[in-house]
Image (spheres, coloured by chain):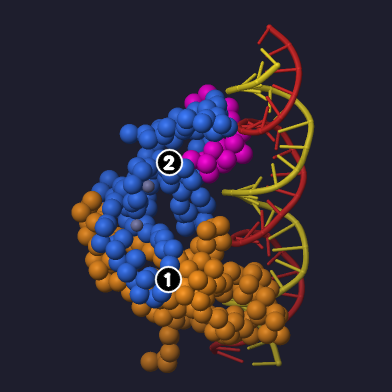
Chain colours: A orange, B blue, C yellow, D red
Amino acid sequence: MTSTDQSGPAGRSAVRPTRQRRAVAAALAGFDDFRSAQEIHDLITEQGDSVGLATVYRTLAALADAGEVDMLRNEDGEAIWRSCSDAHHHHLVCRACGATVEVEGPAVERWTNAIATEHGFADISHTLEIFGTCPACR
Amino acid sequence: MTSTDQSGPAGRSAVRPTRQRRAVAAALAGFDDFRSAQEIHDLITEQGDSVGLATVYRTLAALADAGEVDMLRNEDGEAIWRSCSDAHHHHLVCRACGATVEVEGPAVERWTNAIATEHGFADISHTLEIFGTCPACR
DNA sequence: CGACAATTGAGAACCGTTGTCAAACTGCGG
DNA sequence: CCGCAGTTTGACAACGGTTCTCAATTGTCG
Ligand SMILES: [Zn+2]
Ligand SMILES: [Zn+2]
Ligand SMILES: [Zn+2]
Ligand SMILES: [Zn+2]
């Protein structure tokens, strides 16, 4: 058994741990609200690292479909990102300061599935975000 | 029922019914899935009318905040539009063909409010869309 | 070490959307 | 019927976020 073949199809390693990816991860660890790619890029710069904007976008996209960060869109349609817990969850976001709370609602999950099934839909997924003004911004 | 009684009593400058706005309304009546502004613009052109793209955007935005059309964003962040019923509702959308069903869920409405209040948030709003594959696209 | 695929970054390209502003259109009062 | 003032329109430029290009670099692995 030739040791590890922990990731890719043809055996060669797929994702390489690079300085840039570490910098993005570090930046993500530094806030817990949702931020745009550009804001994250700025953060990285402030932290002294230098990473191209395109790389930030690429890394965020990769992390997102690896399920390590959540991406959603603000009212203007911009993508905003945040490192989140693994489990399926939704967000309660403060419109003013961006403060974010992860929330879970088994009942809602059940409801969406039921409704969709009822209409004959399959391969169901959903998006749900709650916006409001947090206590601190009142 | 189109509760659009724009002409109020003290009818000072309101929204003027113009050829262009009528064309947009007509286009909106011609489909029941969500379409982008550009697609709607194309539809109008195909119908023989001629309306500037900027005007289409302006009209859609106006209709949207008059509550006569719903706007949401597809995965790419583009705005897509559809004329909907007045009451608050959500959407069950087919990923393949775009077929859309309006759905209501009083329980979900209650849940979002409860969760938000519980965390001290005020002025609550939310977005919720369900995606799947409809029977016809199976 | 040497070969090589994965990765990076500067800048251009994309593309949906919004802003500009002069011309066209309305409703209204005279 | 005419002219004025405010509204609306549209061709086009400008914007801004995101993706693409491609040569140069950098991990990985034998
Ligand atoms: Zn999350
Ligand atoms: Zn859910
Ligand atoms: Zn709707
Ligand atoms: Zn709702």
The answer to whether residue A81 of the structure is visible from this angle is no
In front: B80, or C5?
A: B80
Residue occupying image coordinates x 33% and y 51%: B89
Task: Tally the marks.
Answer: 2
Residue occupying image coordinates x 49% and y 78%: A83
Q: In which chain is the residue bearing label 1?
A: B
Q: Amino acid at mark 1?
A: Phe
In front: B47, or C3?
A: B47
Mark 1–mark 2 distance (CA, rounded to whole Å): 28 Å
Coordinates of residue A67 in the picture (x, y in percent): 43, 75
Left or right of B104? Residue C18 is right
Q: Start and end of the magenta stretch? A: B44-63
Residue occupying image coordinates x 25% and y 61%: B107
The answer to whether residue A110 of the structure is visible from this angle is yes
In front: B48, or C24?
A: C24
Q: Is the residue indicated by label 2 positioned so its CB lies within 8 Å of ligand 3?
A: no
Left or right of A43? Residue B115 is left
Coordinates of residue A102 in the picture (x, y in percent): 40, 76
Q: Is residue B5 above or below residue A125?
A: above
Does the magenta portion include A99?
A: no
Coordinates of residue C1 in the picture (x, y in percent): 71, 92
Residue occupying image coordinates x 68% and y 85%: A47
Does the magenta portion include B49?
A: yes
Q: Which mark is residue B64?
A: none
What residue does disc 1 label? B121
At label 1, counting other C-alpha atoms closer than 10 Å, the crowd grade (few under 14, some 14-19, many 20 or more) is many
At label 2, counting other C-alpha atoms closer than 10 Å, the crowd grade (few under 14, some 14-19, many 20 or more) is many
Q: Amino acid at mark 2?
A: Glu
Coordinates of residue B97 in the picture (x, y in percent): 37, 46
Q: Is residue B106 above or below residue D10?
A: below
Q: In which chain is the residue bearing label 2?
A: B
What residue does disc 2 label? B68
